[in-house]
Image (cartoon, rainbow, N blue to C red):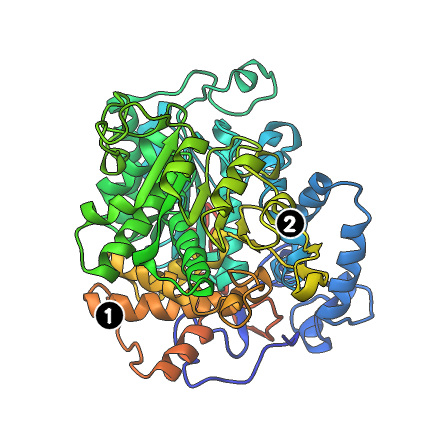
């Protein structure tokens, strides 16, 4: 990536084009304090003259690469990951291009700092490390203000992507109340970093409905509502008010639900999915990326979905979401009913194997309940189920540390040559097993992907006992959800359909390193995530066109042209030349008014 833009494209006339100069109506200190336009020491001689910056900056003109070097040295000087996370947040508020470029250039190192697990620590400490607000805070006690407060953020054409949470089930750390705003912000940062969704066209939202986290309620510094969570009809009406207001005010926006509690995540998705373009990463994203890992594992073992026997340990939002995605894929590939496809999947929760005799089954768990008669008189714990079922895939979404014991793993490996084992619980301390143990207990034969990053593992698993290094794939939703969002935004999808999600999975699986080397990772890594997102977006757009839900005009039919069309609209962390324009007649973007409350002439 260069530091001053790129050659022109035949699609440079598109509204979201990233070619050519960037119009700007700001000058002087106002320009230097605007994170979207600010270049700091990288403003050119001409820009310093045209925008009245000459006396506001040291005389040396530096490149973006030099700025990244300085920023990396500053980052590295911080003593721990949480302080590094705080440093990055501060940088984002000052210079978005530099922030995203620093992350881009050091993504494998910084991903765990800007997202899980460190972002979880930041969320837990939100009220204590709070410096300045970002995003939209809507609270259930002021539900009548929702439409008005949302309306202040822009015109109907200004917002492409909204992430909303109620903070009830955050990153494996539970109810974090209004601190959940940070997960909305983090997810949107990933959509920009990984898929080029324009950072000035996104909106993070938290729906504060109270909290059941007593530590927060007892904390005098807690910034959210100080009462237990509101549930039932009042909660549903509040969420509905938000969704309807968001759709009315920003009709082009794609709505991403994030970290809602188990009882609400699936229910809300099922309610709104037939009506609006929406997505739940915990339900659908986790299922998509896990299915991509499974498909890659089956490729290594020369099997297909017909051969899959999958046990899921942890039947909450993520576990059931994975089961749903895999079931739907089996049904599609085999041409069978979803009911028959579900027979290849076993779900285990706190009470053991889910059967028709379990009284507390949720609506989403029931399709996977095994016959009570079939399991009469049999043990139903994880070891017993593995022994009985002889699965070739074992998925962990339980947040029970070390649940995949040596006995369980060895039992599985005794029946399967290359067991697919995916301990996905986050953060790292909640993993069902660590990769080093899984490989040790299976003599290096396990095909492993995890929910958090782990360093490569060395062991005597090569030919004739030769030491080899195995790089473990991270089953990271970020290789799929940003591309799904990008594709949906660019084609202005009316809905996000099952076929669009299946297509997204195929796009990720096509890029699996394991397709070329059976000890390579099952999934593409974060270092190629922008390529993965572009591929996923292409697959999603093609599926949307086939389904008749794409509303954007002029989408290229030729695949090469479509790829160029997509990449031309992906925002990149480079400094584009600035072109001064007078405020009168300038766009809202040029005037620096995107996502700036108070910039609209009139608001409802």
Front position in the image: 550 or 411: 411
Question: Looking at the rendering, which quadrant does residue 445 occupy?
Answer: bottom right
Picture layout, residue 564 above or below residue 271: below
Front position in the image: 507 or 396: 396
Q: Are marks 2 and 1 in contact (CB under 8 Å)?
A: no
Residue 315 rendering spot, x and y as whole percentages: 37, 34
Q: State the mark number for residue 454.
A: 2
Q: State the mark number for residue 175.
A: none
Picture layout, residue 569 above or below residue 224: below
For label 1, count other residues whose C-alpha is less than 10 Å away and answer few (under 14), some (14-19) or many (20+): some
In the rendered structure, the answer to whether residue 1 lies left or right of residue 586 reads right
Front position in the image: 224 or 567: 567
The residue located at (50%, 70%) in the rendering is 531
Picture layout, residue 573 above or below residue 407: below
Say which quadrant the N terminus sits in: bottom right
For label 2, count other residues whose C-alpha is less than 10 Å away and answer few (under 14), some (14-19) or many (20+): some
Of labels 2 and 1, the one closer to you: 2
Q: State the mark number for residue 545.
A: 1
Front position in the image: 375 or 9: 375
Disc 2 to disc 1, how far (Cα)? 39 Å
Residue 324 rendering spot, x and y as whole percentages: 30, 46
The residue located at (35%, 69%) in the rendering is 539
Q: Earlier in the sequence, mark 2 or mark 1?
A: 2
**Number of disc labels:** 2
Q: Secondary structure at mark 2?
A: loop
Can you see residue 49?
yes
Can you see residue 571?
no
Q: Secondary structure at mark 1?
A: helix
Say which quadrant the C terminus sits in: top left
The residue located at (58%, 46%) in the rendering is 452
């Amino acid at each position: 990536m260069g530091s001053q833009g790129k050659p022109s494209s035949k699609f440079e006339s598109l509204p979201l084009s990233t070619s050519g100069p960037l119009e700007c109506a700001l000058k002087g200190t106002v320009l230097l304090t605007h994170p979207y336009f600010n270049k700091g020491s990288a403003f050119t001689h001409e820009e310093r003259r045209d925008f009245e910056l000459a006396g506001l900056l040291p005389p040396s003109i530096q490149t973006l690469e030099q700025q990244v070097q300085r920023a990396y040295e500053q980052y590295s000087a911080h003593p721990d990951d949480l302080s590094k996370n705080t440093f990055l947040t501060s940088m984002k508020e000052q210079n978005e291009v530099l922030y995203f470029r620093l992350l881009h250039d050091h993504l494998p190192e910084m991903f765990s700092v800007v997202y899980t697990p460190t972002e979880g620590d930041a969320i837990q400490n939100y009220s204590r490390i709070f410096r300045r607000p970002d995003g939209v805070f809507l609270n259930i006690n002021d539900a009548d203000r929702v439409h008005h407060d949302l309306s202040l953020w822009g015109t109907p054409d200004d917002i492409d992507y909204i992430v909303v949470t109620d903070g009830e089930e955050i990153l494996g750390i539970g109810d974090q109340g209004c601190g959940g705003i940070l997960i909305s912000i983090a997810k949107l940062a990933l959509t920009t970093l990984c898929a080029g969704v324009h950072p000035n066209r996104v909106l993070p939202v938290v729906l504060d409905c109270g909290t059941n986290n007593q530590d927060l309620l007892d904390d005098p510094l807690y910034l959210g509502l100080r009462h237990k969570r509101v549930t039932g009809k009042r909660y549903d009406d509040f969420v509905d008010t938000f969704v309807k207001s968001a759709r009315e005010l920003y009709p082009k926006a794609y709505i991403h639900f994030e970290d809602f509690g188990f009882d609400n995540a699936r229910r809300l998705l099922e309610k709104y999915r037939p009506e609006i373009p929406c997505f739940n990463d915990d339900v659908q994203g986790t299922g998509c990326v896990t299915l991509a890992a499974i498909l890659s594992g089956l490729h290594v073992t020369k099997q297909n979905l017909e051969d899959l026997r999958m046990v899921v340990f942890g039947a909450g939002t993520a576990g059931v979401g994975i089961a749903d995605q895999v079931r739907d894929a089996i049904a599609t590939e085999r041409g069978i009913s979803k009911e028959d496809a579900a027979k290849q999947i076993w779900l285990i929760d706190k009470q053991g194997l889910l059967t028709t005799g379990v009284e507390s089954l949720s609506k989403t768990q029931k399709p996977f309940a095994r016959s009570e008669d079939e399991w009469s008189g049999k043990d139903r714990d994880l070891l017993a189920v593995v022994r009985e079922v002889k699965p070739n895939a074992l998925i962990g979404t339980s947040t029970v540390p070390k649940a995949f014991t040596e006995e369980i793993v060895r039992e599985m490996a005794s029946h399967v040559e290359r067991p697919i084992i995916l301990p996905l619980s986050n953060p790292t301390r909640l993993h069902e097993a660590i990769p080093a143990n899984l490989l040790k207990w299976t003599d290096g034969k396990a095909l492993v992907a995890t929910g958090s990053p782990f360093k490569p593992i060395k062991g005597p698993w090569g030919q004739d006992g030769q030491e080899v290094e195995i790089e473990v794939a991270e089953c990271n939703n970020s290789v799929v959800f940003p591309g799904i969002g990008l594709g949906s935004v660019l084609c202005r999808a009316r809905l996000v359909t099952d076929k669009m999600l299946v297509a997204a999975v195929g796009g990720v699986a096509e890029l699996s390193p394991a397709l070329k080397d059976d000890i390579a990772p099952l999934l593409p890594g974060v270092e190629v995530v922008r390529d993965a997102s572009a591929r996923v977006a292409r697959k999603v757009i093609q599926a949307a066109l086939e389904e008749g839900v794409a509303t954007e005009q002029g989408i290229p039919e030729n695949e090469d042209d479509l790829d160029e069309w997509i990449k031309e609209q992906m925002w990149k962390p480079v400094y584009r030349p600035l072109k001064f324009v007078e405020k009168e007649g300038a766009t809202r973007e040029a005037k620096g008014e995107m996502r700036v409350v108070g910039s609209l002439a009139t608001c409802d």
